Amino acid sequence: MFTEVFNNLVDTACKGGLFSMIIITIIWVSIFLYIAFYYAYMPSLMFTRPIHMQFKTCYSDKGLCDYPSAHVKLTKNQQLLMIGQKYKMVVDVDLPESPANENIGMFMLCIRLSDKFGYLVSSSCRSSRLKYKSRLYRIIHTLFMVPFYLTGFSSEKQEVQLEMYTDFEDDQLHPISDIYFEMLDHDIQIYSAKIKIIANLSGLRYLMFHWPILSSFLGIGSNLLFVFFVFSMSWRHIYGPEVYKNEPNDHLDQCEQMDEVDSDYEESEESDDINNKVSERSYSFSSLNPMVPEQ
């Protein structure tokens, strides 16, 4: 008696531990699948690269003999932008509020996108200028910003943003790897410049980025249902026949008993038919052979 109780407790503990391990494994597999899907499906939100302008100086006169230009290498081997995803390209240029830049007025910036073999994928040009400030506004702004200018927390410059592309989509056959910049003005003065490549998220990517908790619950829950369905089907395929073989089935037993009764009834009917036929044959034989009277 004690041995049976102990064996039942051990069996129950083993089944409970196995069930707990299976549930924990399913949960971790669901979480891992969602994380893998997130990093494979979601693009990087923004790429930033500095732009270092280069130029040639003139020997006869001060100034530039050619347009300031730059070359930015985005990637060497692997593809940087995701295929099918739209990106916005913005160039930020820091310009000093100098008399030379104010006298220039409008200026033009052009970029060329090419792949690693030098194939020209696309080109774009945008124009802009410094924001206009009246003399009164400049005096008041300078007086207000004097402490920040003296301490170095600010400087007399303007950041000009030029949106080169609004919905750029990379080509699968010619993915871009190099960007060439050219400022179409000899006299422009530049502090610094950088390019920002921003992903325009939409649909499921927008939901996964802006509502990460909700999307993670939905994704992990869907993975749980899928993994549990696969596990249950596998369990049914491996252990199903043995379970159904060992479990009693009253309906099947009743059907088998009814089949046996039907077979016995059919056998009894066949035996009755045979007996009737034999009796008929004996009667006919007796009628054909009448008794001869004795002399």
Image (cartoon, helix red, strand yellow):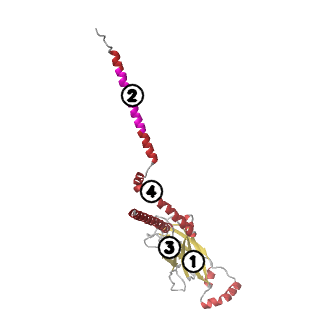
Q: Which residue is mark 2?
A: 273
The N terminus lies in which quarter of the figure?
A: bottom left
Which marked residue is nearer to the observer: mark 3 or mark 1? Answer: 1
Say whether residue 265 is magenta: yes
Structural distance between the alpha carbons of marks 4 and 3: 53 Å
Structural distance between the alpha carbons of marks 3 and 1: 15 Å
SS class, disc 3: strand
Marked residue nearer the N-terminal end (4 or 3): 3
Marked residue nearer the N-terminal end (3 or 1): 1
Residue 152 position in % (x across, y down):
59, 89
Three-letter amino acid code at disc 3? Ile
In the image, which residues are magenta? Answer: 261-282
Mark 3, other Cα within 10 Å: few <14 / some 14–19 / many ≥20: many
Mark 1, other Cα within 10 Å: few <14 / some 14–19 / many ≥20: some
Marked residue nearer the N-terminal end (1 or 2): 1
The C terminus lies in which quarter of the figure?
A: top left
Which marked residue is nearer to the observer: mark 1 or mark 2? Answer: 2
